[in-house]
Amino acid sequence: MAEKKAETEEKYRIALAQEKLVLKSQGMAISLIEDVARGNEEIAHLKFERDKAEDMFKAAIESLRALQAQLSGLQSISRYQSDI
């Protein structure tokens, strides 16, 4: 998961930088380059994939936390039962 997250971030940043260079070489106003580059369909799709990978990573972390909480609860029950 972490690798996929990093790969999608890398692809997005490289494509965005390349698009900004293309727009700059075409003479676009500096103040518009950022918004126009992000509006490019390919760049927008890469951003979507990056955000999706990030959200999947966060969801996996939260799932692990939930499992840790369940394990902690089961350990407490087990400890209580062994004391009886």
Image (cartoon, rainbow, N blue to C red):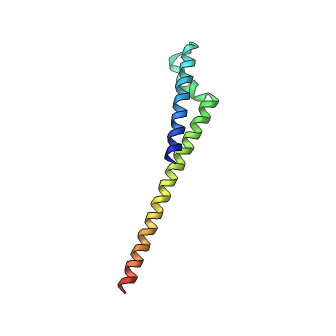
Height in image: 13 above or below 28?
below
Left or right of 40 in this view: 59: left
How many numbered marks, from 0 up? Answer: 0
* Residue at (48% x, 56% y) in the render: 62
Q: Which residue is farthest left? A: 83
Instruction: Name which quarter of the figure residue 76 lies in.
Output: bottom left
Q: Position of residue 37 (x, y in %)?
A: 57, 25
List x then y, in percent, for residue 42. 63, 31
Looking at the image, residue 37 lies above or below residue 58: above
Displayed quadrant of residue 83: bottom left
> Would you place residue 8 above or below residue 79 in this image?
above
Which residue is painted at 55% across and 42% down in the image? 51
Which residue does the image show at 64% across and 30% down from the upper left?
41
Image coords of residue 12 (percent x, y) = 54, 33
Instruction: State whether residue 3 is above or below residue 82.
Output: above
Measured as percent of width and height from the top left, residue 18 is found at: 55, 23
Q: Quadrant of the C terminus?
A: bottom left
Q: Check the image and name the residue furthest to the bottom.
A: 84
